[in-house]
Each structure stands twice: as structure tokens, then as C-alpha cells.
Image: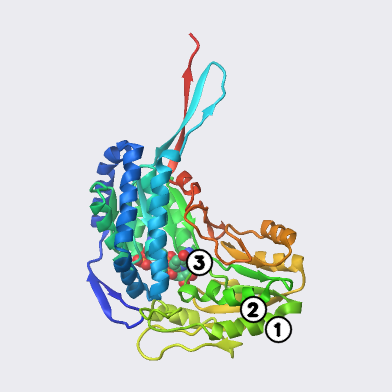
Amino acid sequence: MSTVVNPATEETLAEIESAGVEETDAAVARAKAAFPAWRAVSPTDRGRLLRRLATLVEEHHEELSRIESRNVGKPIGGARGEVGMVAHVFHFYAGAVDKHHGETIPVAGGVDLTFREPLGVVGLITPWNFPLNIASWKLGPALACGNTVVLKPAELTPLSTMRLGELALEAGIPEGVVNIVVGKGSVVGQRLIEHPDVAKIGFTGSTEVGQQVMRGAAGTIKRVTLELGGKSANVIFADADLEKAAAAAPYAVFDNAGQDCCARSRVLIERSAYDKFAELFVAATRKLKVGDPEDESSEMGPLISAAHRETVASFVNGEPLFRGDAPAGKGFWYPATIVEATTDDRVAREEVFGPVAALIPFEDEADAVRIANASQYGLSGSIWTRDGARAFRVARAIDTGVLSINSNSSVRPSTPFGGFKQSGFGRELGMHALAGYSEVKNVYYATEG
Ligand code: NDP
């Protein structure tokens, strides 16, 4: 039995029977049985079903947002934005079904064609920080390509995904196509990774578990897509609009209480602008409203658990440059915190996954690129400058999968998302994600008599 808790109040939201290996095997068997009929559904009808699911998410927008806000401790405004994105993702993949074309390739003596075939049963393992969003990023392309799915949400935050499973049925997606299994990663997740009838694992979570996914998948040569940790840099050049960059910077690292693989938790500042930017950044962070996630004006909620709060706290030694306010009493609260660091400090190297920003000065463009790349991770990042040529030079030089210039916003349903280096591989979102949920089949047809 697992107890699902509201991290803002520590109240129990639900008690859920944890699935074991037997239930996981049963879900894989259901998905396997449903596969032949689902892959045979015409592209137009598959698109129509995904669009109906998107519409149902829109119709249940407030309900899903409340569930997500209570279970993750997210400010309700942010939760509403995320649920809006879930609907958008399903709309996008509804439209993508009949645009995932094959090719014809010039060859001698005949015709050569490629087909995009579904993989079969795919296992999806999702984390607790953006439960519904990340579920949709995987479900959308998996279903669009004609796969059936066993989805394991994080045990801490299963509620919104369970509701989405009900909505998928209500949308008319046939029984057995989407199977939600709630249970421990070490049991349900592990079984999916090893199961011979699961063709692929789509995983988002820690780099450590990502390594286990890769190792486990080797036994059956499973395909894997891994979206793992990050330690992204927010690079501020002295010629940037410093006011605008500083006003935006707190949201790039403290959003979702820093529990975001894209968090720009290393703020690299050109030395000549360091003092001014640090002052503006602290002033902007001071205004961040931390409190009850269901209060419409809240901008930051608590961390996911007491254990995670301890991990986050272990990164802050000594007096920080700034420490904000956070509610006392019940809830896993941790204040927005800004520290000054060097590239060697643990806070500048490891993923904190909490509201802790590390300020690091740099000397010039080459130094900025060197520091930005001095990380095992390469997921996201931002570049702030008024020099357009430099913005693109630096964007090309930083080894990271997703970047924004004069903005911290780089995740959209229609554009590819994923990492370099130990942030993982494979791409989610956009048309690129379809490649991760299909195989290319090449067929030659001889035409000579
Ligand atoms: P995990 O990587 O442990 O969890 C992610 C998912 O993997 C959950 O569904 C979890 O299940 C599952 N899982 C755990 N162990 C296994 C396993 N052996 N086999 C298969 N699946 C497994 O992340 P944590 O929750 O422990 O968070 C730890 C750190 O990971 C964070 O502090 C952060 O640094 C990073 N992280 C990164 C995320 C990202 O978006 N890239 C998201 C979440 C975490 P369950 O929890 O139910 O046991």
C-alpha cells in the first residue's frame, strides 16, 4: 500500500495498492493483446481519438490542475499552464498521425519505400516533478505511432496520471491500449525494463536510474529514450538587457521549487556586470511569492518530500547571498536561496533539484562557453545578450539539447526536447519524438519484367 501525500500540508490524499510483478505482467499482456487492433486503426481515426482525449483534458482542465497542484505542491497557476500544455500535446500528436511519412528512394530495377512501423508494447516510466506533462510527452507520440502502452507514474504522484487513464478510455481509446500501473520503480519499473514483450522504455528521471534502465534494457535489446538530470547555465553577458534578464531569472530556477530538469541553476554572469546583475537578481527573487499552492498568487510551493528537502539543504553550506521566506509548520518548505560559487563547488556541479541558484562570474565569451560546458549534463540553458552574432556563436558552442536566447522558455509541444551528454538521449515533443516510437522498415519492389 502506498500513501499519497500533499507536500504542502502533509495530509494523506489517497492510499493506493502498489502493483507487483504479477500486475505488471498482466498489464503488458493486455497491451500486447490490444496491439494488433490498435495498429490497424486508420490514421484518421487514431488522430480523431487523440483529439478527443485532448478535448477531454480541456474539459477537465480545472479538475486535473487541482489534482496536480495538491499532489505535487505546485502553485495552481503553474498547474493550469501544465494541463493546458497536456491538451496541446495531444492536439499536436492527433495532427501528426498522418504526417509521419515514409520515403521513396531512387534505386535500380525497382521501387524502394520506407514505412514507419510501431514498436509494439512500450513501457513509460515518469517522474514526480511534472507527472501529467511528462506522461503526455511520451503517450502522445507512442499512441500516434500505433503502439500500446504500460505507463508507470512515480509512486509519490500517481493521481493525475490515473485520471488521465480514465479519460483515455472515455475518449474511446480501446481497452488495453493505455494501461496505468502504480507501483515502485524497483518493482514495476524494473519488470517493464526486463520484460521480453516490452519493446521500448521511455524514461524520465535521475541519471542514476537512467543508467539502470540502459543496463537492464541490454538484456532484450530494448530501445530506450532517456530524459535525465541537468545543470543548465543561464549565461548573462554585460551587454544584455540586465533588468529583463534579472526579472526573468528567478522563474528559470525557482519555478516548480527548482524541481525541474531544465532549471537554469548555474547563473553565469560576465564579471563587469556581476555586481549589478546579482543585486537585480536578489531584488527580483525577494518578490517571489512562496506559499499555499492553492492561493492564486503563489509562485512557489514546497518540495516533494521531507527526504528530498534534506538532500536540497545539504547543498547550502554557510551563509548564502540571499535566503527568502518560506512557511513554517507542516509541509516540505524550503526557501529560494542564492549562493555565490566557483565551478568546482558541489552546488555548481551536481543537480540540486531544489530552489538553489549558484552565481558564477566569467571573464569573456570563451570563458562563458568553457564554464557552461564544464558539466556532465547538457539539457537546457539560456543566453542573454544584445549581440545577435554572439548569441548564435555561443548557442552553437554550448553542448546542450535545448537553448533559449533572451528568454528562458524553450519547451514547446511542436519543438524537440532532450539532452546531450549524461542528460540522456532521444528526443521528446515535436515530430522528432515520433522517431523514438517507430522503426523504419525498408521495402524493395522489383519492377523489371
Ligand atoms: P528516480 O529516477 O528514482 O524516479 C523516476 C522514475 O523512475 C519514478 O517513476 C521511479 O519510481 C522510477 N524508478 C526508480 N527506480 C527505478 C528502477 N530501479 N527501475 C525502474 N524505474 C525506477 O528519481 P527520484 O524520484 O529518486 O529523484 C531523484 C533525483 O533524480 C532528483 O533529485 C533529481 O535530481 C532527479 N530527477 C530528475 C528528473 C527529470 O525531470 N529529469 C525527474 C525526477 C528526478 P518510484 O519513484 O515510484 O519508485
The figure's colour scheme reads rainbow
| Residue positioned 34% across, 62% down in the render | 153
Q: Residues within 10 Å of mark 2 (few under 14, many from 20)?
A: many
Q: Of helix, strand and loop, which one carries label 3?
A: loop
The answer to whether one can see residue 158 in this image is no
Q: Of helix, strand and loop, which one carries label 1?
A: helix
Q: Of helix, strand and loop, which one carries label 2?
A: strand
Q: Residues within 10 Å of mark 3 (few under 14, many from 20)?
A: many
Return the x and y of residue 430 as percentages of the image width and height.
49, 50
Return the x and y of residue 178 as percentages of the image width and height.
29, 51
Could you tell me how many numbered marks the image carries? 3
CB at disc 1 and ligand 1 closer than 8 Å: no
Amino acid at dot 3:
Cys
Amino acid at dot 2:
Leu
Q: Mark 2 sits on what residue? A: 359
Q: Mark 3 sits on what residue? A: 261
Residues at badges 3 and 2 in contact (C-beta under 8 Å)? no
Quarter-wise, where is residue 89 in the image? Answer: bottom left
Q: Nearer the viewer, residue 52 or 164?
A: 52
